[in-house]
Amino acid sequence: MSGKNNEISNGVNLLEEREEEKIKPARKKITKIFTYLITFLVIAFFIFSSQVIVSEQDPNSWIYKIPIIGQIKHLAESADKQLKGEDRDRINLLLLGMGGKNHDGGYLTDTVMLASLEPSTKKVALLSIPRDLTIPMEGLGWRKINNVNAYAEAKTPGSGGVAISQALSDVLETPVDYFIRLDFEGFVNIINELGGIDVYVDNTLDDPSYPIMGMEEAEPYEARFEHLHIPAGWQKMDGELALKYVRSRHAGGAEGSDFARARRQQKVIEAAKNKFLSKNTLFRPSIITNILSEFDEHLSTNVKIWEAIKLWNMFKDVSGENITNKVLDNSANGLLVETRGEDGAYILTPRSGDFAEIQYLVNNIFSDAPIEAKTKVKVEKSSLDIRNGTWINGLASVTALDLEKYGFNVARISNCSHRDFQKSVIYDLTYGEKMESLSVLKEKTGANVSFNLPQWLIDDIKKELEDEKNPEQPDFILILGQDADKTSSGVDNPEK
């Protein structure tokens, strides 16, 4: 009998062990779902917002009724831990988009955006950085910024996000605290899970040679491409079309540059954010669950759960007027210039020869002009030609960055043919018709005012007009002197 009892006992134990083995994966799955749900609630707004931060939330949403979320939310609110960057009142988050493992060149970052958050003011800024910008890489010389992630992943899988964060931190001389990286497949699937998005297309996009994914080696050569045409106006986009819209690089006209791509990316991200925050999405748990699954497969980040919760609580109510969007570009007044690398490849480099101007933009991106002064300039729609009358490198650029915040349209930035100015001078070509703008400009720069142009400047302008196809006369010409080195927003030496 004792033998049978032992057999029965062993059988019971065996059944209990098997049941326990079944229960454990179920528990793990539930824990995993809740973990991703919590993470998603706070990280999603970074991924799907050109504003970087969600501006409104329904406090009665089913999400906040889940007990575990309420507990963790309370824990985050009462935690003494500080976020990275919180002690310096500046949290920098890098947003990255890449092709992914199933895409040709899958670890090259197609999208690079630096989101900056200022806790004390609840201000947010988003800076789009072109993929062709070259930066120094340790042991490899100068490389395009979109290569950093790929080089790191080839050497040590999983290290790409940290590597590009560090590289960008070095050139901008500002810490990059966090990163979030999403691949194309995840992007497409998430848009589709949302049921598509509505995007306003500013300019008709016509790209005769958009590359077809998976057809990179197809023959004949023409079979590798499709004709992408998206009319201007409101368009309903599924994930595939949205991806094409943000990735197109060979469109004609205004949409044919990487900088136009950056702006399109911001529009699509904002549309996705709006769709995600709609009640049709937030009150349908199945959609949230499916999106969580996509995040699990296609998203990488170093943001911890408690950090994401705290970020959410700090910035969830940010208002639209506290959000700034910038794009680094090679326009007439941009901070970049296009050139060719040693191998003949197209690259972008800082216009000043170093990163001082870009660093100035990043470090002062939250500074703004008084609303009253800005309104006066915008009402008069004043344009400005800024010329550096000194040998101080970058003086005109940093002055332009400051004056743009006052609403001036900076039509031109250049070096003056005379570089011996001690005192800055404003030449008023409106002859007093825009006195409000002139008053703001004089107060900001401390410059003298003249209504008569010297002959040498008249000759310079005449020659410039002959060289330009569609010249437009500015309202004011500002020639910067040595004194501007001290009066321009406290910048003592832009070369530093």
Image (cartoon, helix red, strand yellow):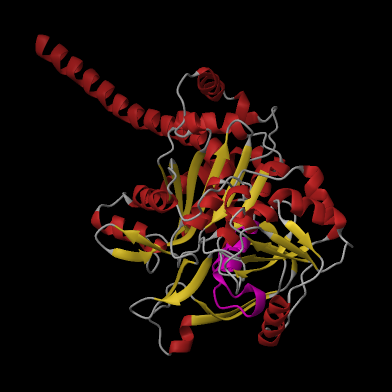
Between 323 and 464, the one lying in front of the other is 464
Residue 17, given in percent of the width and then of the height, sits at 25, 23
Q: Tell me which corner region of the image, top left, top right, bottom left or bottom right, holds residue 226.
A: bottom right
Image quarter hosting the N terminus? top left
Total marks placed? 0
Per the picture, the main secondary structure of the magenta-coloured stretch is: helix
Residue 320 falls left or right of residue 63: right
Q: Residue lying farthest top?
A: 2
Q: Is residue 243 rendered magenta in the image?
A: yes
Residue 102, given in percent of the width and then of the height, sits at 38, 63
Residue 229, given in percent of the width and then of the height, sits at 65, 77
Residue at 59% over, 48% down: 486
Q: Residue lying farthest left?
A: 3
Residue 323 falls left or right of residue 353: right
Residue at 68% over, 78% down: 456
Residue 246, given in percent of the width and then of the height, sits at 57, 65
Q: Tell me which corner region of the image, top left, top right, bottom left or bottom right, holds residue 104.
A: bottom left
Q: Is residue 257 visible?
A: yes
Q: Is residue 52 visible?
A: no
Residue 443 falls left or right of residue 171: right
Q: Is residue 349 rendered magenta in the image?
A: no
Which residues make up the magenta segment?
242-269
Between 121 and 162, the one lying in front of the other is 121
